[in-house]
């Protein structure tokens, strides 16, 4: 399986463009199974190495490869996609190129980017293209005298949403992020203060699924670097503070055919979806429990996806598997002839989140699935009996439940690759076990002298 992007210039032309931009070093970048950016520095003169055999890495040193310590499959090579080469304004002299994994001279199926490429090929076979708009919510934090994280804004308002005073305190940091991303081709159209102190959201224009994943990874790299230079920590942790709202990473999804015509939308439908759109929605809902393992892949994710009362007193996070028109209380929201999947958070590997999304949606089409009845009510107001009465199921409430759901979803595993899913489960399961065996401050406070 080759990269989908087609080179638009020769290596010599690319090197000349980079030299003109003052670039001397290329960051050959890929992500591990957690979605964390990894890579190494390569002098610009050796750009052809990245585009040829690729930049070399010790395979077993990378989370989630499952590669051996010896033999021809011990080496992981990151082969660059020339279309992603661009200078980084926040790191003068440096440029990034996105790499996909190669092992023993062949495309590596356990590479997260290649897992997404495989699903994009399935869309291409139908003549479809998935456009994705990503809404990153994040905190900027600093530490108090005890070294514990606190929101950088330090505004203790009950409802800081859209607060201009707090926004102004970090305007220079946010502006540097905006300028850097804009120079890299992002169309940033909105920045706001979210529901919690120190919490912000960037909105930038949608793009195709692969470019969206590559761009979100670059967003993380830019935001982290710029925040660190300002003495702050950028975090996509879903729930960094128990008494404040958490951060999501909502995915706005729309499909078009080769002529650019909407596939999932139907303006005549009361909920804005075509027959195909409803099948796509049905696939997402049918596999939501297993999808949680990719979209909410951390222990902390489930401090956000809570049933009932939240310690923060306010939440827009989904906890139940349902859908409705412009309904932010369900996991799937239809609006403006597109779907918004609200399960995802920033601790996810965006390549795997999008790959699993496509796989689930295509399962809905291939099996001609029908979604449950839409819900056009505020389900935060329902009591437990109402959920039972309507047959509305709950999303996993722990990482352990999500991993168990993924393990049981053989259809999704087959679509993504049984070997890859097995490696993912082997990587994430110890994380859950470690958490279950750890002892927290909460336990000391509650049990040290009890009963």
Image (tube, rainbow, N blue to C red):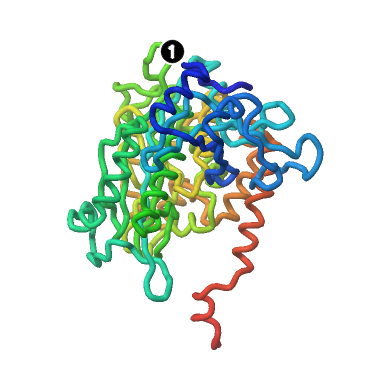
**Can you give x and y, in whole percent of width and height, for residue 300 in the image?**
49, 58
Q: What residue is drawn where x is 53% and y is 54%?
A: 298
Looking at the rendered structure, the secondary structure element under dot 1 is: loop
Q: Which residue lies most toward the right here?
A: 71
- Can residue 6 be seen here? The reply is no
Q: Which residue lies most toward the left here?
A: 164
Does 156 sit left or right of 81 as displayed? left
Up the image or down, 445 lies above or below 184; here it is below
**Can you give x and y, in whole percent of width and height, for residue 249 in the image?**
41, 44
Quadrant (top left/top right/bottom left/bottom right) for the C terminus = bottom right
Q: What residue is drawn where x is 47% and y is 16%?
A: 9
- Can residue 310 be seen here? The reply is yes
Residue 231's quadrant in the figure?
A: bottom left
Q: Which residue lies most toward the top here?
A: 259
Up the image or down, 421 lies above or below 11; here it is below
**Can you give x and y, in whole percent of width and height, for residue 156 in the image?**
25, 67
């Amino acid at each position: 399986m080759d990269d989908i992007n087609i080179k638009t210039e020769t290596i010599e032309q690319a090197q000349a463009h980079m030299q003109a931009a003052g670039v001397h070093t290329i960051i050959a970048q890929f992500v591990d199974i957690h979605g964390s950016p990894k890579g190494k520095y390569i002098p610009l003169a050796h750009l052809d190495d990245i585009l040829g055999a690729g930049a070399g890495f010790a395979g077993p040193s990378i989370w989630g490869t499952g590669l051996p310590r010896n033999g021809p499959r011990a080496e992981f090579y990151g082969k660059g996609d020339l279309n992603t080469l661009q200078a980084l304004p926040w790191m003068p002299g440096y440029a990034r190129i996105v790499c996909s994994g190669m092992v023993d001279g062949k495309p590596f199926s356990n590479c997260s980017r290649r897992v997404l490429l495989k699903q994009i090929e399935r869309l291409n076979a139908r003549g479809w293209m998935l456009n994705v708009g990503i809404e990153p919510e994040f905190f900027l934090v600093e530490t108090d005298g005890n070294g514990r994280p606190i929101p950088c804004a330090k505004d203790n308002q009950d409802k800081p949403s859209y607060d201009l005073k707090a926004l102004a305190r970090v305007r220079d940091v946010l502006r540097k992020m905006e300028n850097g991303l804009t120079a890299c081709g992002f169309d940033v159209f909105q920045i706001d203060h979210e529901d919690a102190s120190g919490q912000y959201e960037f909105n930038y224009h949608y793009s195709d699924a692969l470019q969206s994943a590559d761009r979100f990874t670059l967003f993380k790299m830019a935001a982290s670097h710029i925040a660190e230079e300002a003495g702050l920590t950028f975090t996509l942790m879903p729930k960094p503070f128990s008494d404040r709202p958490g951060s999501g990473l909502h995915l706005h999804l729309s499909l078009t055919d080769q002529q650019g015509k909407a596939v999932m939308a139907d303006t005549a439908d009361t909920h804005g979806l075509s027959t195909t759109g409803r099948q796509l929605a049905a696939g997402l809902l049918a596999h939501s429990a297993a999808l949680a393992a990719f979209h909410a892949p951390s222990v902390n994710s489930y401090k956000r996806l809570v049933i009932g009362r939240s310690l923060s007193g306010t939440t827009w996070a989904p906890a139940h598997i349902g859908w409705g028109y412009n309904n932010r209380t369900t996991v799937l929201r239809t609006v403006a002839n597109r779907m918004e999947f609200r399960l995802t958070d920033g601790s996810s590997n965006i390549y795997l989140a999008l790959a699993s999304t496509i796989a689930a949606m295509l399962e809905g089409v291939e099996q001609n699935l029908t979604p449950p009845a839409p819900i056009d009510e505020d389900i935060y107001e329902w009591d437990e009996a109402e959920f039972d009465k309507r047959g509305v199921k709950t999303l996993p409430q722990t990482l352990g439940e999500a991993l168990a759901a993924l393990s049981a979803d053989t259809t999704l595993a087959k679509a993504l690759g049984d070997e890859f899913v097995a490696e993912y489960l082997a990587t994430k399961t110890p994380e859950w076990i470690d958490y279950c065996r750890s002892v927290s401050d909460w336990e000391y406070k509650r049990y040290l002298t009890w009963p």
